Every structure is written in structure tokens, then in C-alpha cells.
Image (spheres, rainbow, N blue to C red):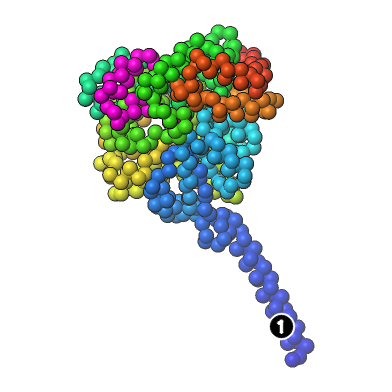
Amino acid sequence: MSKQRKRFSLVLALLMAVTLVLSACGGSKNASESGGTGDDAVELIWYTIGTPQKDVNKVMEEVSKYTKEKINATVTMKMVDWGDYPQKMQVNVASGEPMDILFTSSGGFDYVQNARKGAFLELDDLLAEYGQDLTKTIDPAFLSGSKVDGHNYGIPANKELPQQEVWRFNQMLVDKYKLDISGVRTLDSLEPLLKTIKENEASVTPFAMDKNYVPYVPYDYVIQNLPMAIKLDTTDYKLVNILETPEMKEALTTMHKYYKAGYVSAEAATTGSTNDLTTSGNWFLDRAQTQPLADNQWSASYGYQVVSTPASEAIITNTSVQGSIMAISANSEYPEKAMEFLNLLNTDPVLRNMVDSGIEGTHYKKVDDTHMENLPESKNYDMPSYSLGNNMLLYLNSNDPDNKWDEFKKFNAEGINSPILSFNFDASNVSAELTAVQNVKEQYWAALMTGTLDPAANLDQVIEKFNQAGLEKVMAEAQSQLDAWRAENK
């Protein structure tokens, strides 16, 4: 071979090498932009709360076909049952379990505390770049009310803003025994109704509840389901131990009376969910948080009529503003793609309704452009709507009026602000004490609240256990911060 041909061959080889390098760089860029390798879609792992549903994987296959086309991402949903969610997610986050999106709230895997611990990604920049559509859709009160130390760490569900408790009744049993529920409001007022059901319906649980049940008293909790709270009509903004208040003592006494009478399940303090009761219809009453036209939604979901009466005023609290949030894990492999998905979920009616109601023609059918009806297979995909994004994109139930979402806006506008709305306690100075307090709560709280423990014999002891764990120190720190917050906000 001549020297000239050798030189040409060397130049050709170098050109080919450069071409390969440039192709590789281009391929790398495309993979980065799509979130995967070449045409491969990113798999987003989504942890959410609720009784695991039989058809969740089937529905997510259809969801993934849609999201792959829209944003080149597929979705795997992992559901964790109600009572297990906070503890299970604490373990998952601590162990580095792969996840991209996770449900959080004031009461279910505490939003504020876990944001401060670094479990969630700060979303300000991601919202500005990939979430512009959802910021125009969600009520600004949710986005501002869910900020922690001035930053967003999650996307709140666009839903009812106030928190209002109601007593829910199985209408079949109300009608069967011609029960008058019009005067029901307080816990004590339930007694004659519960007695009737207990005496006549051996297979029915008169008062359905799980281990998350807490009797309603007119206080707002600094941290959901921990004893420190402030009265809703406070003038001095003094935090109290809820277990020492006359209202809670009276409620716990009533609950124990109901427990001894057999109105409450013997397993209530350890039950993770009452889904089996609502599926079977073998319950008479429970307590729930309502929203406009909620009775229609519950009735459509369960397949039989549910009716409710108020158990509280409609109060806007941190719990209600932060009652349903989707965060992006601080360890997410694909945070940009996760935000693209949340933006789509909260703005696209097709995706939102598929996630909520399942597959059209299998789990539900359209009645008209805006109304739907559940089909028998919906029992295999019965999801908690409030936890899954923008509720105001959902199809209406067949008996919902066309102005349902206008009713929501009216309900939101008329809510009464809690005195500590937007106050978020920073527990970093008392983290050891708070952990010890939470351990005491795990031991005694559910048993007390469900009436399993006799408050006459156990309440003082439980209060002492909380104090020994450091509750008084935690409350002193919270009071100091509340006083400073109050002065700052006048």
C-alpha cells in the first residue's frame, strides 16, 4: 500500500471515529430529553394511599399508553392501605426505595415534617419550567397554603378547601328502621340510632371506624393526630394538650361507652381500613370529611345510597389545605418527567378521569359529555378521588347537577379560617422529643380514640407517658414559634 493510501485510510478512520463520537453525543442528548435510552419511555413509580385495588395494574397499562404518547413516560402505581401508609412510607423513604411521586398530607405521611427532613424535592424551579399549566388551574390558596418555609414541595389536589366533618349513614338501614337523622350533630346524639341497629342487625357494624378515627372536638391540631392543639375560637392563642380538655375527655368517655355496648368493632384500634364494610354494606354509620354533593359520589362509588348530616363547621385548616398533596421524591431518578406527569394529570381530563375511574367501557360508561355511571367492574377499581389530583376535571356522577364545580367554589369561598392557618411548626429543635412522643402515640392513641381503652382508668397514665416522652417541651417550643408567628402576622 502506498504512503498516500495509508494516509487516506488513516484520515478515513479518524473521520469515522469522530462521526461515531458525535452520534453517541447526539444519542445521549436524545436519551436525556426523552428521559430514557433512545425511544425508551421513562418508568415513573407512584406511591399512593388507599386499599390496593385488583385492577390497578390493568388501569395503569392504559394510563401508560396515554402518557407515553403525551410525555414519553409510563406509570407504575403502588398502593399502600390507609392505616399502613404513614409507617410504610417512612420505611420506604429511609431505605431509599425507588420512587418518583408519592402521596403526602398533613395526616398521611406528614407533609411539612417530611419536607423539612428532605424527603421531597423543592419544586419551585420545576413548577416554573414544567408546571406552568397546573399553576393556572389550581386554586392559588392551595399552592400558597402548602408552602413550607416559603417553598413548594408538592402539588395539592384542587378540591374542597375547608374541612367539614359529617356523619354518614347507610340509607338502606335508615329507611328500614324509619330512623330520624335530622337532629344528629354531636357524638352523644348517635346513641339511640346505634342502639336500634345493634339490637336488630347482628351482621352489621353500627359505628364503622379504623385506627385513624379521632372524635371531633372544636380544636385545630398543630401536628395532625398528636395531642397539642388550639381551640378554634381562641383569643389568647394558647396551645393545650387535647387529652386534658373537657371536650376530648367527654368524647373519649362516650366512645368507651359505645365500645362496651358493641357499637364499635373490637378490632377498630388495629383495623387499617373499613373498605370491606363499605363494599359489603354491613355498616350503619361512620364519620367522614365532606364536600359539595359528596353523598352522590359516595352512593355512586358504593352502589347503594349514602346520606350525611353535618358534624362540624366548615373550617379552613392546614390539614384541609394540605390534605392531599403529590410530592416528588428527593431521590427521584426523573424529577423533570415526574413534574411533566403531574402537570398533565392536573390539566388533562382524559388522564385525570382514567386514573380516577378506570377504563371506559370496563369500569364506567359515559352518560353524556360530562356525566358518567360506574359499571359492575368498578368494584375492582374504586379509588379515593381526593388523593389523585385536580378533582374539578372529573366527570360528574349521573345525578350530579351541571353546576357541581361552581358549588365547590362557593363552598371554598365560605369556609372559616382556623386561627393557626398557615402556621407550620418547625420541630428541628425538639426532634428527639417529638420522635419519643410519636412512639407513645403509636402505643396508645388509636386505643384511646376508638374507645378500646377506658379513659377513667387509663387517660391520666397516657398523659403522663406523653409528658415523660417530652410533650411539654415540644409544646413549649411550638408555643414560642406560634407567638412569634402571631406577632409577625399581626
The spot of residue 190 in percent (x, y) is 34, 17
| Residue that appears at 40% across and 22% down | 259
User: How far across and down, in percent of the image, does residue 189 sit?
Assistant: 35, 14
Question: Which image quarter: residue 13?
Answer: bottom right
Task: Name the kind of residue labelled 1 in the image.
Answer: Ser
For image coordinates 78% across by 88% down, the residue present is 3
Q: Residue at x 62, y 25 (%)?
A: 437
Label 1: which residue? 9
State the extent of the magenta-drawn residues as a range: 186-211
Along the line of sight, which residue is nearer the eye, 313 or 342? Answer: 313
Image vertical order of residue 75 relative to residue 308, above or below: below
Instruction: Using the rendered image of the protein, determine whether residue 155 is visible from the camera's viewpoint.
Output: no
Q: Nearer the viewer, residue 146 or 134?
A: 146
Q: As displayed, is residue 219 above or below residue 124?
A: above
Q: Residue furthest top?
A: 235
Residue sitting at the far right: 3
Determine which quarter of the picture holds residue 283: top left
| Residue 294 in view, yes or no | yes
In the picture, measured across the screen, residue 268 lies left or right of residue 399, that is right
Please state, as top left, top right, bottom left or bottom right, where the N terminus lies in the image: bottom right
Q: Dividing the picture into quarters, in which one does residue 30 lie?
A: bottom right
